[in-house]
Image (spheres, rainbow, N blue to C red):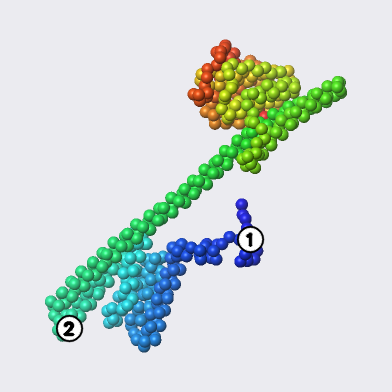
Amino acid sequence: MTTGRSPDAPAGPHSAGSAPQPGRTGRGFRDPFRWIIENPGTVDLIGFGTAAALMLLFGLGGGVIGWWVLFSVPMVLAGAVCRTRPLLGVIVIGVLAVSHVLVGTPVVAGDAMTFYAMFCAVAYGTTAVHLIGVAAGMLGVLVQASWFGIAALLSEYGGVGQAAITFVGLGIIGTITIIAIWALANLQRARVRQLALTRDRAEQAVREREQRTALAVADERARIAREMHDVVAHSLSVIIAQADGGRFVASQKPEKAVEVLGTIGETGRAALADMRSLLGVLRQEDETSFGPQPGPEQLPELLERVRAAGLEVDLEVEGSLGQLPSSVGMSVFRLVQEALTNVLKHAGPGASASVRLVRGAEGLVIEVVDDGQGTDPTSDGLGHGLTGMRERMSVLGGTLQAGPLPSRGYRVRATVPLPADHGTPAEADGPASPYTTTDPGPAADDPRGETP
């Protein structure tokens, strides 16, 4: 979500919503060292540009303008690109270093930049630039040693021995210097790589945190969507069934219309309470509670509302349903609610249903069976009821089977494992379910429609 001033609005020094931009008014002055690290090209341009300007002013002011100034100033100025473009810096400084020797000036102040150019080539360049930088440094040592060796040979007081000593000595000193700079540059290269790796890891951690947040938001939205579907679909199904029957009752027995309207009102209020609870989650009001979450103890009230809507339904419980985990209890209630809603909508007229809950040593079994038409030919099969039930069970580590029975009717059967401390055996094993003789395929292949 975008906050603060619009980019087209005039910015003022005390704008309430404007945030300081990196490198500008706030961040650059509050954290100058960070700005220096993040802007190496600008920093080098300022530093080496100032040094070149001072060198030029010194030459002009002292009246000592010569070849050294003409070569030193460009070499110092070229140092501004050595960190950002090390190959370009090596080429420019190397060409200038060889050129001033060719014109008869063996040493100038700018020759110090040859070492800096090599350092940047090794520390910040690619492998090819690294090799080019070292080769250029060794070439510079060879050129300087050869120049002074030849000068010693041609000197009035020199000779071959003097020339050899000069060449070898300067070669050794230059090589040691090159090796030392190469070692320091490799340390800097390792440090740069470590910083880059640390930055990449930090960015990866940020991306992973954002992905986890997005997944958590998606999971929460899916959970709320399932809750909304269960609340709205069930309550509206009951209300619609009551309203359809209420029209007939009002015309035949007006005194019964009051009872129908009362059922509609109770169902609406219960749905409104559930909606408030869900909206409380959306508003993230941690300290606000709109009442306990539904559980198995609310199943009798649910069945009463369904019976009032015209569906005969029985409840059979084997074993104790007390001390169930809250997540399991709510999922049991929602599963039974959704299954009975589907019966109301798809089983057809005159259907009845039975709800059976069995708690055993291995877990809890929920079974909802009706004797209706089994499949609904008028449904497009695009609902989300069975999908939501399957997701609820998968979150709890359980399974769901749903499908028409061989002769007539429809069955929804779910198995939920319980933790060891909750998995008390049922008080009575009871007879096996008469509806477990067939194993319908997954709901994805089920031709029966669902609650939209």
Residue 183 in view, yes or no: yes
* Viewer-nearest residue: 411 or 328: 328
Q: Please tell me whether mark 2 sits on a helix, a strand or a loop.
A: loop
Figure label count: 2
* Viewer-nearest residue: 373 or 32: 32
Residue 401 in view, yes or no: no
Mark in front: 2 vs 1: 1
Picture coordinates of residue 178 (x, y %)? 27, 66
Residue 109: image quadrant is bottom left
The type of residue carrying mark 1 is Ala
Residue reaching furthest top? Answer: 431
Residue 437: image quadrant is top right
On screen, residue 240 versus residue 337, left or right, reads right
Picture coordinates of residue 284 (x, y %)? 62, 42
* Viewer-nearest residue: 91 or 223: 223
Picture coordinates of residue 33 (x, y %)? 45, 64
Q: Residue at x 24, y 71 (%)?
A: 142
Q: Which residue is mark 1?
A: 16
Q: Which residue is mark 2?
A: 155
